[in-house]
Amino acid sequence: MGKSLASVALMTLLAWPAVLSAATGVEGARLWPAPDHTRLVLDTAAKVDHNVFSLTGPARLVIDMKNVDLRTDFSGLDLSGSPIKRIRSARRNGNDLRVVLDLKDDIKPRSFQLEPNQQYGHRLVVDLIDEGGLKTQKPATPTVAQNPNGKRDIVVVIDAGHGGEDPGAIGPRGTREKDVVFSMAKTLQRLINENPGFTAKLTRTGDYYIDLRSRTLLARKHNADLFVSVHADAFRTPQPSGASVFALSERGATSESARWLAQSENRSDLIGGAGGVSLNGRDEMLAGVLLDLSMTASINSSLGVGSSILGKLGNVTKLHKRGVEQAAFVVLKSPDIPSLLVEAGFISNPQEERNLASSAYQRKLANAVFDGIYDYFAKTPPPGTLLAHQKASGKIGGSISQYRIRRGDTLSTLAREYQTSVSELMRFNGLNNDRVMVGQTIRIPAS
């Protein structure tokens, strides 16, 4: 009897590690549809050993996970806007889990795991890449809007940082960077599009993630005159505050030049924008010289427009640094497009977190960023643009001014004083009617 009990105890001990190893579970799931891919995220209690493969006839994607339990319900996921028709799951080999995605069309899968962050624990990420959508969603021809007089618009591509599964920095009250910067990017886009001679495009139009290289690729596809990436800074302590503007550093330019010259697919790309110079067929030395010249000109322009934006930001908020800083951020590494990263403030600072969550404060920052952009291009407009035509004919040359409404002011009196119209002032400031309040600040277009 004693021997029998000992045998049972031994068998129980031997089985114990297997029980422990099967404790990892899928705790939750999220779906992030984007124009060219859909991201499925599975929350897991720990890292999981997994395998992903596709099947055809009909199209399916299989996700096998070893020693994993299902502890969530996939039926709660909204599959609209995704290539997924249905999600099924079943036990396999005793302790394993198989998840099957029934698809509308064939896709290219990609999977990887993410470490825990401020908001989520361990995650298994499965991207369903629509290669056809990738070609159709990203424009094959440059975005160059034409004005009635045949002069093109200045194209500004605005990049809201982070998105989707990547929340960015999170403030002490739970404000997420990705939400703040997307709201601010949309506000900036509206301001830019309301002004003749400008067109603004967004890199992302919803809550999904775009990899950093694809953001700069979109700017090139749109033939952008300027690329502005909007972020909110964070630090390990709550004290730091203030807005910052970054351009590409010389070290970043050097590494990017080497990357461009090393990758043969880049050789056919133009540097210098529309009508620029192709590196294709150039010998190594000449290609390097042309690329360095383009990089230098791009950085100088970035510093110029960055300084203009920083000056305007300093009128409406505290600055973290008085000058444009330089760093090797990947999103700034366009060899022929002036590129800036604007840190709207420190979301880790309690007061700035409250400010950044306010739509009125976001609008104030967006106004300042656009004023800086307008001032720079009014002084140095790209050839062939409406602003270049207006400058040559003496119609512009000054900067946008800001006016604080005083008692007795009306839009009609201000329109007469500044030689513009009430409708133009309303359009320029995004007003729905001609009523203004004492203390309100409005923007006056340069005449």
Image (spheres, rainbow, N blue to C red):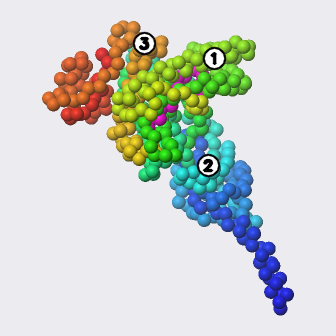
Q: Residues within 10 Å of mark 3 (few under 14, many from 20)?
A: many
Residues marked 1 and 2 touching at CB (< 8 Å): no
The residue that disc 1 covers is 292
Left or right: 56 in relation to 335: right
The residue under the point 62% across, 19% down is 270
The residue that disc 2 covers is 104
The boundaries of the magenta stretch are 333-345
Q: Residues within 10 Å of mark 2 (few under 14, many from 20)?
A: some
Task: Tell me which amino acid carries mark 1.
Answer: Asp
The residue under the point 42% across, 32% down is 319
Q: Residues within 10 Å of mark 1 (few under 14, many from 20)?
A: some
Disc 2, SS:
loop
First of labels 3, 1 by sequence position: 1
The residue under the point 50% across, 22% down is 303
Q: Position of residue 178 (x, y in %)?
A: 49, 43
Q: Position of residue 28 (x, y in %)?
A: 57, 59
Task: Tell me which amino acid carries mark 3.
Answer: Ala
Q: Position of residue 430 (x, y in %)?
A: 31, 32
Disc 3, SS:
helix
